[in-house]
Image (cartoon, rainbow, N blue to C red):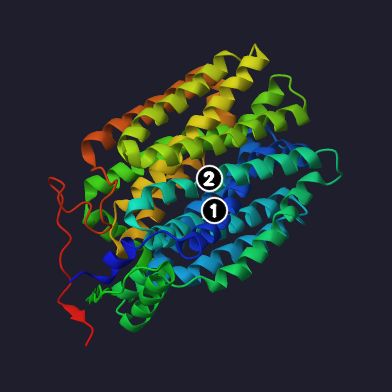
Amino acid sequence: MRTGDQIVQDLPWRWGVQGKIFLIGGLGYMFDAWDVALNGFLTPLIGTEFGLSPAQRGLVATANLIGMAVGAVAWGTVADRIGRKKAFSITLLVFALFSVFGAFSPNIEVFLLLRFLAGVGLGGCIPVDYAIVSEFSPKKQRGRVLAAMDGWWPIGATLAGVSATLLVPVEGNWRWMLVLMILPALLLFWIRRGVPESPLYLSRMGRETEARAVIDDMVTRTGAAPEPYVIPEPVVEDKRGGAWAAAVDQLRRVWAFNPKITAVAWSLFIAVMLVYYAALSWMPSILKAQGFGEIAAFASTTLMNALGIVGVAISVLVVDRYGRKRVIAIAGPVAAATLVLFSLLLGTPTLAIVAIGAFGLFALIVIPVMYAYVSELYPTELRASGFGWASSSSRAITGFAPLLFGSVLWPVLGLPLTFTLLGVLVVGAVVFMWVGAPETAGRELDRITTDVPDSPAVESTGTERTTA
């Protein structure tokens, strides 16, 4: 007899059922992108208003990204403890409140603090959103669905660029840029209350009645044929010691589950996102330093973000056909190479813009596939925290990238060598992935890593319960 999670993963895709979860989860992810992309546009404006040096301007993005690193760990762990649904809503509310407070910052110190706190809220969106969407998605469509999730990223980044470009002539422009995204974020917070809890999470937590109610409702609404199923015994965890102890325990469990898998996940996140955030945070400033006007620099960066929408569409088409690993192995190094090309073509503005457009395209092919891949490598009870720790590891390091980029890398090494070094890191992470982790396309969640050489099998947690 099959288990409840197998029933969920074999259901037919329906836009009114799983599609609703995808849309609501994706809109939250859109705000993550909007906020991160906005750092690049805020940096030159905040720097001018508060008279910041190039190194100090890097703090604008650093404060926000470090907050997201903290949030990714905290909320991934919280989501594994209190449930996807509650964390799903709270993360967005925290982000919205501190973002609107940030718009009224009287000085740079208050601004950086509030951007950090907004990042803590928003940093939880990615691991929580990916966990709940992956756990509702049928396994046959899961790769495409999770890759399509990242389509919300270039949409959010493009909205950030369009709003920033249009608001450049407005007095107090950077303050209005922060305020503009608050109302839709609060509206989404209200809508998210109607999202059901993940049935995989409910079954792992021993909430069998609730899990069956969600599964049975999904079977009915998707038009699938009802069949009996069993709910596995819950995973027993020691929840003593508070949130910090819980986070440390989840980190221990993430590495204990499979050290090689976790090392692959962290190395991919760190290398790929280091390249992406360095470009996203500094591209308007780089273009301005090359003689572009403020509006032209903002518009060119917006074009880079907009082409990412095409990149995500391509990733959706290829992720299941060619497999996660192959797409990452090709698109990751190519994306890094386009930045090197961009730095060599800065003397020819038109070709330089073409190169950053190509970067936006290839970066948003590799990132959605990478997110789908990493989220599938962990079992349900570790999925949000495993993804969250991988995301946090990248943001803890990339959080300092804007600061180092503006104070050391760009002025000392120059752009071509800086982007070349970052590209070498991407190639190294791709090679490690190729030899150290399995392909996940088309396989059942919670059973993907059990047959990997030198990988500890997922141990049974007890007997199963059946319906009377």
Q: For the N terminus, which image quadrant?
A: bottom left
**Residue 357, placed above or below residue 144:** above
**Residue 55, placed above or below residue 247:** above
Label whose residue precedes the other's in the sequence (1 or 2) = 1
Residue lying at the far top of the rendered structure: 347
Dot 2 alpha-carbon crowd within 10 angstroms: few under 14, some 14 to 19, many 20 or more? many
Query: Would you say residue 7 is visible in this rendering?
Result: yes
Amino acid type at circle 1 is Tyr
Residue 175: numbered disc:
none
Residue 156 on image: x %, y %: 62, 47
Dot 1 alpha-carbon crowd within 10 angstroms: few under 14, some 14 to 19, many 20 or more? many
Comparing 64 with 385, the one in front is: 385
Tell me which residue sits at (56%, 73%) in the image.
193
Residue 137 on image: x %, y %: 39, 59
**Residue 83, placed above or below residue 108:** below
Amino acid type at circle 2 is Gly
- Observer-side mark, 1 or 2, equals 2
Secondary element at image label 2: loop
Residue 373 on image: x %, y %: 34, 46
Residue 453 on image: x %, y %: 12, 45
Q: For the C terminus, which image quadrant?
A: bottom left
Cα gap from disc 1 to disc 2, whole angstroms? 9 Å
Comparing 6 with 49, the one in front is: 6
Q: Residue 233 sits in which quadrant?
A: bottom left
Tell me which residue sits at (70%, 54%) in the image.
181
Give the residue number, with chain letter if any, for mark 2: 151
**Residue 349, placed above or below residue 460:** above
Give the residue number, with chain letter if any, for mark 1: 29
Comparing 452 with 394, the one in front is: 452
